[in-house]
Image: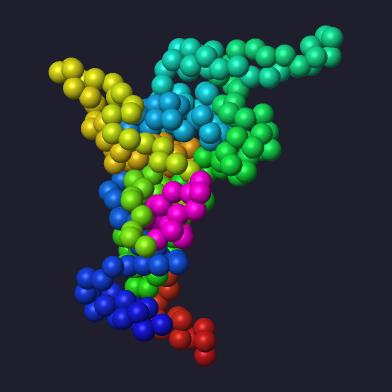
Amino acid sequence: MMKRTLLIAAAVLGLSAPALAAEGTPVPPQLKWSFHGPFGTFDRAQLQRGFKIYREVCSSCHSLNYVAFRNLAEPGGPEFSEAQVRALAAEYKVQDGPNDAGDMFERPARPADHFPAPFPNENAAAAANGGKAPPDLSLMAKARTYERGFPWFVFDMFTQFAETGPDYVHAVLDGYKEPPAGSQVPAGGHYNEYFPGHIIAMPKPLSDGQVEYPKDANGQPQAPETVDQYSRDVTAFLMWTAEPKLEARKRIGFQAILFLILLSGLLYFTKKKVWAKVGHSDVTATHS
C-alpha cells in the first residue's frame, strides 16, 4: 500500500518513478506509432513486413480468423496488388463442399476466403501446444491492454494516446529475459518481463535475423532485422487486423468536426440576422 502511494505521489509531482501494471509487472514502454493521433496512418511498408512475420513465424500456431485474403488489397491496409493477393491465396488450401457426392474436399484458396487456421479445431490446437490453444490474433492488438492509472489517463485525453494494446503486444514479444536469481519457472513456462505473472507458455517466437526483409536499392534490408523491429512490424500489422478501417474512421471524424464547426458558424450568423430585425424596445413591449 505504501509503495502504491509513493508511486502515485511521484507521478503527480512529475518525478521519475518506475510505473507498475497489475501484479507488479512493469508498464510497457510507450512507443511512437505511425497510426497515433487523429491524423495517424498506417505505414504500408511496415504492414507488409508485419504480414511477412505473421506468415513465416506466427501462422504456424496462431489463426487470423477475421481476415480474408482480399483484405490485404483494400485501401488503408498493406495494399498488396490484386495479382499478389490471388497468388498468395492460391498457396493455401481450404476445405469446401459438399460436392455432388456429398463429400467435403480441399481446393486452393481464393481472395474471398479467410486465412485458414493452423489446426482443424481448438482441441487439436490445445493438444499440440501443451494443453492450451494459442489465441486468434485478429483482434489481439485491441484485446490486450493495460491500465495506465492516474494521472496519465488525464493526459491521454489531450494527447489522444490510445496505443496501450500495441505497446503491450510489442513489449511481450520483446520481453523474454533470463529469469532473475531465485525465481522459479515451471516446466513448459518461459520468463517474460511484461507478461502478467512473468510466466508465459509461449516460447520466445522471434530472434535476430530470423526473417529476411526485402532489400532496398542498395541491397540493404528495408529495416533492421532485429527482435525489436520484428516486434514493431508484426504489432503494427495486428493493429491493422484489429482495426482495418482506422484511417477511414479518422478521416470521417475529421470531416464531421469540420462540418459541425461550419454548421455552428452558419447557425450563429443566422441567429444574428434573424434577431437583428427585432429591436430592444419591441422585445420589451412583447414581454410587458
Residue 153, how many percent across, how many down? 38, 67
Residue 165, how many percent across, how many down? 43, 51
Outermost bottom residue:
288
* Residue 39 at least partly seen: no
Question: Quadrant of residue 81 in the image?
Answer: top left
* Residue located at (29% from left, 50% from top): 31
Outermost left residue:
218
* Residue located at (84% from left, 14% from top): 102
Q: Point out the stretch of residues depicted in magenta.
A: 183-198
Q: Nearer the viewer, residue 3 or 113?
A: 3
Magenta segment's dominant SS is: loop
Question: Quadrant of residue 14 in the image?
Answer: bottom left
Q: Nearer the viewer, residue 59 or 177?
A: 177
Is residue 154 inside the magenta stretch? no
Quadrant of the drawing holding the N terminus: bottom left
Residue 278, how many percent across, how many down? 43, 73
Outermost top residue:
100
The correct choice, above or below, for 56 with respect to 274 in the image is: above
Residue 174, how many percent across, how many down? 34, 46
Q: How many marks?
A: 0
